[in-house]
Image: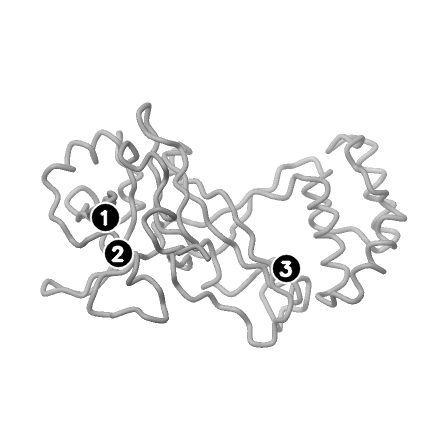
Amino acid sequence: MKNLLSLAYALPVDAPDALLIGRVWIDGPEGTGPVLALVTASDVLDLSSVAATASQLLELPDVVKAVRAAAPFLPRLADTAAVLANSAAGVRKPQLPWLLAPCDLQAIKAAGVTFVASMLERVIEEQARGDASKAEAVRSAVVSVIGDNLSSIKPGSPEAAKLKDVLIAQGVWSQYLEVGIGPDAEIFTKSQPLSAVGTGAEVGIHPHSHWNNPEPEIVLAVNSRGEVLGAALGNDVNLRDFEGRSACCWARPRTTTPRARLAHSFVCLTSTSTSTMCAAAS
């Protein structure tokens, strides 16, 4: 069993050359709250002199240059391995630092499904309404209308529009098919700011949910100018048995509880000398 909160698993293989940005919760003499941090294999350093929040940091004209210039003068907050170990929710000591999600005031956005196999399975899950025993029957019904291969259909084409009309008439049209063969790419709000959780944190699984599907996802750090400044890996916990149900359960399809969003702890800023991906434990 891998120790997900070990340095070997949580840090990227090129950690000595990477520029890792995270947030830690501090309970100290100067107050309690989140602190922006620069993370190395040995130390967690206080980055609040450069920016108070992750969203503010990403708005700087040259983030990598600013962080590298400040790095030699940053106060040390804690040992990285100790912070990782204390991030496990079940054994956490609240008086010691632990990792938060690296994002704070940014909106959490997501791109739509693009792979045909995944798209078809999402349609089936949506039609089955969370009942795993019905999934195979729904799969047969959907495939009989759609077929098992949409690769020949060009998204947004007249042929795709005709197929949409047929599927609507058959009652099996889905928002996921809109993404896959519709005319527009889907970029949607995944969850509200400050709803992501960090490595080792508990996620909010509904007590009546029995069909859950954790999904690893690429997470990009983007500023208001549309510049991709860094990346991380995270998890999205989908509650399949609640997808597509009425608003009395959730606000809209594909919504999970806010605490179940994108559990990751470091964003790896990109430059010519750093990696473009930080594989964080999640």
Which residue does the numbered mark 1 point to in the structure image?
A: 37
Does 247 sit left or right of 263 as displayed? Answer: right
Above or below, 221 relative to 52: above
For disc 3, the neighbor class at 10 Å (few under 14, some 14 to 19, many from 20) is some
Give the x, y percent position of residue 38. Answer: 23, 44
Dot 3 or dot 2: first in sequence order is 2
Q: Tell me the residue that label 3 is attached to.
A: 253
**How far apart are labels 3 and 1 at the CA level?**
35 Å
| Residue at point 70%, 46% (across, down) | 119
* Image quadrant where residue 155 sits: top right
Nearer to us of marks 3 and 2 is 2
| Residue for point 22% across, 54% down | 35
Q: Position of residue 62 (x, y in %)?
A: 26, 29
Q: Is residue 97 above or below residue 93?
A: above
Q: Foreground residue, 20 or 33?
A: 20
Q: Kindly identify the amino acid type of the residue bearing the numbered disc 1.
A: Ala
Q: State left or right for residue 227 relative to residue 175.
A: left
Q: For the residues marked 3 and 2, what is the alpha-carbon distance in whole angstroms?
A: 32 Å
The image quarter in which residue 65 lies: top left
Mark 2 in CB contact with mark 1 (< 8 angstroms): yes
